Each structure stands twice: as C-alpha cells, then as structure tokens.
Amino acid sequence: MNLDLADATHFVRSLVEAQGALVIDRWRSAVPAQAKDRRDFATSVDVEVEQHLKAALADRFPGHGLSGEETGADQADAEYQWLIDPIDGTKYYAAQASLFSLSVGLLYRDRPVLGVVYDAAANRCFHAFDGGGAFVDDERLTGSAVVEMSRVIINVDTPQTHALSAAERAWFEGRLLELTRRVYRIRALGLGSLAACWLASGAFDAYVDLTGYTKPQDLAAGRVIMREAGARVEALEPSVGPPRLLAAPPALWEPLRDLLTGGIQLPTTIRG
C-alpha cells in the first residue's frame, strides 16, 4: 500500500463535514426522489451529495474505484475502492428525525483500511484508519469494557427480513430469541454506520448483522472504526444463508459466536 492513510483521512473528514453542512441545510425540504424497492428510497439530497463526494474523491485519488449506494460503481477492478453512503438512514432523514449519517470507507484489496462517519445532526465526526486508532473528533475511542454476557447491550441489524427464505427466517428468529434470553438488552438502530460508531464509543457492547444482507456501503467505514477501537470484527459462517458480521470486544466475541452458530432448541410452549 502506497497511500498515506492519515493524510487521506484528514481529506475525507473535511470533505464529509462540508457535505454534511449541505445535508443539514436541505433537511427540512428533503422529500423522496426515487424508489429503490417497496421499503427503500433515496432523496434528491442523497444523489447530489454522492455525486459531490465521488467527484472530489476521483479528483484527489485518480485511479481509485468508487462505489456509491445511489449512483453505482466506477473502476470496480481497482485495488483501492471507496464505498460511499451519502445518507445512511434516509428514511429517518426524510421524516425529520436526527438519526442519519454520511459514511465513506476505503478498501484496499477488499480489506477496510479507512473510515469516516459524520453524525451531521450532532456535528460529530467518527474516523479511523488502519493502525491509527479510532476517534470521535479528537477524542480517542476504546470501545466497551463489558465482559459478562448478562450485561451486554447488542445492536442487531436485520435487513431484508421480508425476503428471507424459510430456512434463513428460522435461523434468524431462533438466534434473535436466544439473544433476548442471554444478553441484557437488544437494540435495532436500523443504521449500521452509527451503530458501529456507538460500539466504538462504548454505547453498545456488540453488533451483529442477523440476516447477512447489510449493504457494503453501510459498514465499510464502521468496520474500520470498530476494529481500531479494539473490537474483533469478523464474519460468521452460519448453517444457512450468507456470512453474518459480528463485532464485539475480544472477551465477548467467542461466546457470542458460539451462541449464534450453535444449536438452539426453541420452546414448544410459551409461559404467561
């Protein structure tokens, strides 16, 4: 790798924060612009911000690939690939709720090496690069210190549950039920980028994609931020369906892995 990751991170922070100002400026007037499917849509702001980000990154890093959630991929065979989600949480954004972010991650030969997530409504920038630590603005992040399963607050992502096969749905429902029995709290933020940042800050103790269908742009940046904050971030290979990403402090990762991949006996009765 011949890219200065610290310099690249500084550039991307400035770029994303500037586009975040546009996102906030247009917030009150944002309306759905195009439907992706019956549950998902983009606003005109998503498209405009992604175009700005891609143009600036292409100018600064010619020869790098660019993959945007709204406008597709360019130079898909390049070693360096920028993954862009201009507004993660568009449904929240369009509904005037403050739970959304701008996310830009960099892969080198498919490994996430740089991530910037801007929580525009809170004016907080989470950022990390490979070997450089994780930060929110200038504050170092070290993740959760929880080591007991009974104290764990875990964020679960559940994309595409409406499209799961019968076998995938049974796996998903069984693991979700088992988590409710074994951990302290389950959250479903519905926003992978910020969930990753909140794990890095210690607000969550663990993160799992329970269906395996989270979009790469949603977590490209967050994976670096979680890893650099001390989390173990690896994919599980379940008995059915695609790999599921699990992130947690090292002391929690294997117990959660065993819970999610082991056999589960579902109850035959429900007690009142």
Image: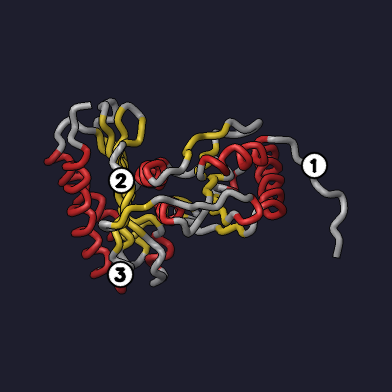
Give the structural element (helix, strand or loop) at label 3.
helix
Crowding near the residue tagged with mark 2, few <14, some 14–19, many ≥20 C-alpha atoms within 10 Å = many
Q: Is residue 55 visible?
A: yes
Residue on which the image places disc 2: 128
Q: Nearer the viewer, mark 3 or mark 1?
A: 1
Residue on which the image places disc 1: 265
Crowding near the residue tagged with mark 1, few <14, some 14–19, many ≥20 C-alpha atoms within 10 Å = few
Q: Position of residue 62 (x, y in %)?
A: 14, 34
- Name the side, left or right, on which 186 lies relative to 45: right
Q: Amino acid at mark 2?
A: Ala
- Name the side, left or right, on which 173 lies relative to 207: right
- Name the side, left or right, on which 226 lies relative to 139: right
Q: Position of residue 101 (x, y in %)?
A: 35, 58
Front-lying residue, 26 or 35: 26
Q: Which mark is residue 16?
A: none
Question: Which comes sooner in the sequence, label 1 or label 2?
Answer: 2
Q: Amino acid at mark 3?
A: Trp
Q: Which residue is depicted at the point 28% across and 54% down?
A: 47
Question: Which comes sooner in the sequence, label 3 or label 1?
Answer: 3
Front-lying residue, 227 or 25: 227
Residue on which the image places disc 3: 27
- Give the CA distance from mark 2 to mark 3: 27 Å
Q: Which residue is depicted at the point 35% across and 45% down?
A: 221
Q: Amino acid at mark 1?
A: Gln
Q: Is residue 92 above or below residue 135?
A: below
Give the structural element (helix, strand or loop) at label 1.
loop
Q: Which residue is depicted at the point 37% across and 46% down?
A: 225
Quarter of the picture containing the C terminus is bottom right
